[in-house]
Image (cartoon, rainbow, N blue to C red):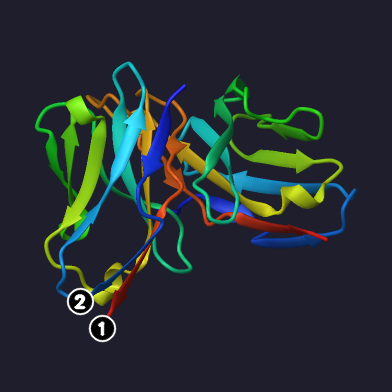
Amino acid sequence: EAGVVQSPRYKIIEKKQPVAFWCNPISGHNTLYWYLQNLGQGPELLIRYENEEAVDDSQLPKDRFSAERLKGVDSTLKIQPAELGDSAVYLCASSSRSAGESYNEQFFGPGTRLTVL
Amino acid sequence: AQSVSQHNHHVILSEAASLELGCNYSYGGTVNLFWYVQYPGQHLQLLLKYFSGDPLVKGIKGFEAEFIKSKFSFNLRKPSVQWSDTAEYFCAVNRGGADGLTFGKGTHLIIQP
């Protein structure tokens, strides 16, 4: 089974430029998450999708960040314009309900490491 | 809102030493608890989880964790570490279902041969 795929793996841009990250979840996983991981910190949730609906975007800085999951499969996270403080690793994860379980195990992708100069 | 505190940011041990990494969480309701591991150059992987039942849970690679509700703790243990256990370890919680995870800051574990 293929895991969560993210691209690009690395991105270097200058401040004020736009940038986009792409995520392809595990086939059949209806829940998709974007997390931000700063250096030396644990991941922090940015947004969660159930199919194509954003059900939790309370931590997404909406002035410059946007996300979409138009067909309930792939997702794109965009930053416009990027700032120096946005340098971090952006992680995508996906999950699906397991029968008889009270939780959905989240599977993480390799992340996109963004450097803003 | 829930929060997670990991006591040690850097731990260095020799092979065969015993390991215990501390994790405390802050949340008044029912939570699910997780330990994730990130080996060098790899993505986050689930090590073990607790959501109900026996508070002592066993995970992959000989790891175990004990949920102590009265202390809001979920410490990770391994009786004898190996060089290959060198990695970053993250404690995490959520309220269940498909809820997003709240992570601690992580513990960087280095095992010296």
- Looking at the image, residue B60 sits to the left or right of residue A113; the answer is left
Q: Residues within 10 Å of mark 2 (few under 14, many from 20)?
A: some
Determine which residue is flagged by label 1.
Answer: B113
Q: Chain for mark 2? A: B
Amino acid type indicated by mark 2: Glu
Identify the element where label 1 is drawn.
loop
Q: Which mark, residue B15?
A: 2
Residue that lies at the very extreme toward the top in this rendered image: B29
Percent of width and height locating residue A2: 45, 54
Residue B20 image point, x, y percent: 21, 55
Q: Is residue B43 above or below residue B70?
A: below
* Residue at position x 72%, y 30% in the image: A61
The answer to whether mark 1 and mark 2 are in CB contact below 8 A is: yes
The numbered mark at residue B103 is none
* Badges 1 and 2, same chain: yes
- Closer to the chain start, of discs 1 and 2, is 2
Amino acid on which the number 1 mark rests in the picture: Pro
Residue B66 x %, y %: 16, 40
Q: Which residue is nearer to you in this view: A52 or A46? A: A46
Task: Give the alpha-carbon distance from disc 1 to disc 2, as whole Å.
Answer: 6 Å
User: Circle 2 — which element?
Assistant: loop
Q: Residue at x 52, y 44 (%)?
A: A43
Indicate the quadrant where residue A73 lies.
Answer: top right
Q: Residue A29: horizontal and vertical position, in percent? A: 46, 35
Q: Quadrant of residue A9?
A: bottom right
Pick the front one: A66 or A7: A66
Q: Is residue A42 above or below residue B107?
A: above
Q: Is residue A1 left or right of residue A101?
A: right
Q: Classify the position of the C terminus of chain B by image quarter.
A: bottom left
Say which chain tag 1 marks. B
Residue ranking furthest to the bottom: B113
